[in-house]
Image (cartoon, rainbow, N blue to C red):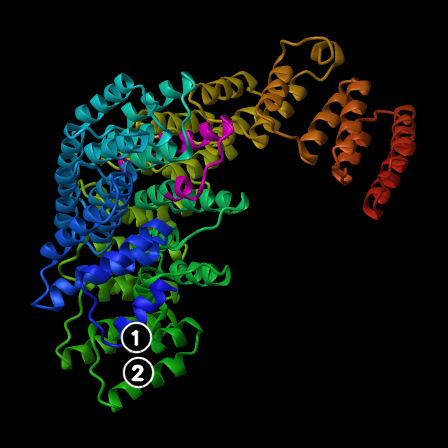
Amino acid sequence: MAFSFFKTMKDRGFQHDVDSYAAMIRILCDSGLHRCLHSVLVDIIKCDGRDNNFDLSYFLDSLTVIFIDNTNTNQQFSVLVKFYDALIKSYVTIGMFDEAVDALFQTQRHGILPHIFTCNFLINRLIGHQKLDMAISVYKQLKRLGLRPNSYTYSIVIKGLCRRGTLDEALDVFEEMDKAGVTPSPFAYAAYIEGLCANHRSDIGYQILKTWIATNFCIDVYAFTAVIRGFCNEMKLDVAENILLDMENMGLVPDMHCYSALICGFCKSGDFVKALTIHNDMLSKGIKTNCEVVSSILHCFCRLGMHSEVVDWFNEFKELGVFLDEASYNIVIDAFCRVGGTPIDVFGQQGNLVGALKVFEEMKERGFRLDIVTCNIHAAVLCRQGCAREALDLLDYMETLNLKPNTVTYNLIIENLCIGGNVKVAKEFFKSLKDKSLDNYAAMISGYCQSNHTAEAYELFHEVARQGLLVKKSSCYKLLKNLCNEANIDAIFMLIKTLVDLGVEPDKFVFSQVIATFCRAGDMEKAQFIFNMLLESGSVPDVITYTILMHGYCKLRRVPEAFNLFHDMKRRGIKPDLISCTVLLDSQLKTFPKKTELGFSGSEHNDVSIISGEMKRLKIRPDVICYTVLIGNLWKAGCYQDAAGFYDEMIESGLKPDVVTYLALLSRSCNVEELHRTLHDLGRRSSKGVLFSKSTISALRGRISKSMKAK
């Protein structure tokens, strides 16, 4: 009520004097009404700028004298500390840092020191506003005045020193804490690790993190985030991803900041497939995405020239209800302008050439000045729709507008002529260009690829490469993709060698596709060669690439090579997944078709047991496919009890066998007696609630009929 009366009188024009302000401040200090006290002090501070007759310094000194004269010693100490605490925080809140520091050190004249929380608040805000030298100076001066820092004080000072780049001084603070008997908080450790990572010493930061974890220090997720972000900034993305896996193995749940740093890192490297994979993994764990991550993904697509994908993903993120900021909209507007944001191109993308032409004519009739971007888009639309003559006429029209066609114009015409089915015209137009740039060659190669003229694209690529030049990566990768689709092994191999010879670092995603192509063709030597190139480049293949190569060896019954890869993968810290384990189980079980050779039940040292043990250790739960592999192969080898055990285990785990599972059992029944035994066993197990579908029953009948005829 007192504060309400005070405020009402002021609003009605009454000018409070020092005594009334002092009375109100003392009341608010005693009652703990911090927000009200803050508003009064902010008003006093602002009066200094509004009223020339108001001397803030004199006014505050007078308030202090009144507090001292009108209270006993204990009350005086309490009121003064609360007053200066609130005053310092008010100065800081409105950005008057110099005045806040002055107020802080004025307290020593009255034989008091502000509360440690206030000092921490001031130092932290100074660091947050990049006033690092001032923050450290305040800290050192406070220590000289007898302030006893607490754990949080030390932590924010470590943060400030690290941001200033004086890491040795930050390390000294830990020694100060030890001498003072203060236990460092997780924030202190995280601040030092973040400082190392921010100064491109992420490897040291991670080593320290692991050391502290090993000595049972309490480390939170923030420290891991700092290390992941540090390695991403240094473009050591595989290391950063492994740290995320390490967190999960330790039982720590990565938060949005961990995932965000990793996604943004892969986007920066241009590996949008990996970025999207990690993004999907994040969403599957119930962690919501944000506009920073979205902008990184959209910007990645934009840099790779995948403007249509920018628009598609932007719409998908909107449907997910993700808040999109100005940066996201700017990116998609730019993409629209390139492929789908003007009325002309919208009509063109929809195949409505008449509509596109109408809009173009309306723009001319209404006097809109056509710029190079509009004309480029219109030319692309005409080419894409097969109107080659009209597109080339547009070039002459641009000359009348004093718009000189540029490299982008020529590239759009070349590529879109090919897409529109006019490859011959595109080739002639390309040859007619006098001063061809590398981008023009890239456009022609891309056009050839998009129209499935792969041989011509390959020939043109080598024409450029023989001169020691290289077209942009996106065109090279389009050519590789086409060659992979056509399984042109020799051409793929030569193209990869050429890229490496010209200094192109292997792209993990693209090389995985190449390895898969070689494996499908059964050329494991070339597949292994490409795989080794990845390793030599310092780019550690992921579990998918390892699995592709292992599967290739397994198909050719070269199981030892597959298991060598499996062990190599684990040595490099790559966690096997269900697919890789299933591939190896299937190959190993097929390698020993007889019960006596398999030794599944008795031996704990065979490779099957190793894989099974690894799955249990990593808590990899088998799915229907994995169980089908186990059941079918064990049944064929005569290990009926083991097969039946896995069948029961599958049912009890809540998985429903499919037709493939049943057929795997039936296909291993070599004679009528075994077939009857299998049917009887399945019938008994169906009493557990497993019902046969119509397709399964039909397959069973077919198998029975076939066996009866054979007999």
Residue sitting farthest toward the left: 52
Left or right: 657 with respect to 293? right
Judge whether 357 appears above or below 312 on screen.
below
Where does the image place residue 536, in percent across and percent down from the top left? 32, 25
Q: Kindly tell me whether residue 244 is visible in this rendering.
A: yes
Q: Quadrant of the C terminus?
A: top right
Q: Label 2 sits on what residue type?
A: Phe
Residue type at mark 1: give it: His
Q: Which residues are magenta?
A: 233-260
Instruction: Determine whether the residue tagged by mark 1 lies in a helix, strand or loop.
Output: helix
Residue 7 in the magenta stretch? The answer is no
- CA separation in Å, label 1 and label 2: 8 Å
For this view, does 333 lie left or right of residue 94? right
82 vs 125, nearest the viewer:
82
Q: Main secondary structure of the magenta part?
A: helix
> Which residue is identified by label 1?
378
Q: Nearer the viewer, residue 137 or 583?
A: 137
* Above or below 201: residue 290: below
256 in the magenta segment: yes
Left or right, 630 with reference to 691:
left
- Element at badge 2? helix
Q: Residue at x 52, y 21 (%)?
A: 562
At which x and y percent is residue 163? 20, 36
Quarter that holds the N terminus: bottom left
Q: Crowdedness of circle 1 by 10 Å Cα count: few (<14), some, many (20+)?
A: many
Q: Residues within 10 Å of mark 2 (few under 14, many from 20)?
A: some
Residue 423 appearing in the image: no
Residue that label 2 marks: 360
Q: Kindly check if marks 1 and 2 are in contact, taking CB atoms under 8 A apart as contact.
A: yes
Q: Position of residue 558 (x, y in %)?
A: 55, 20
Q: Of all residues shown, which one is farthest toward the bottom?
A: 365
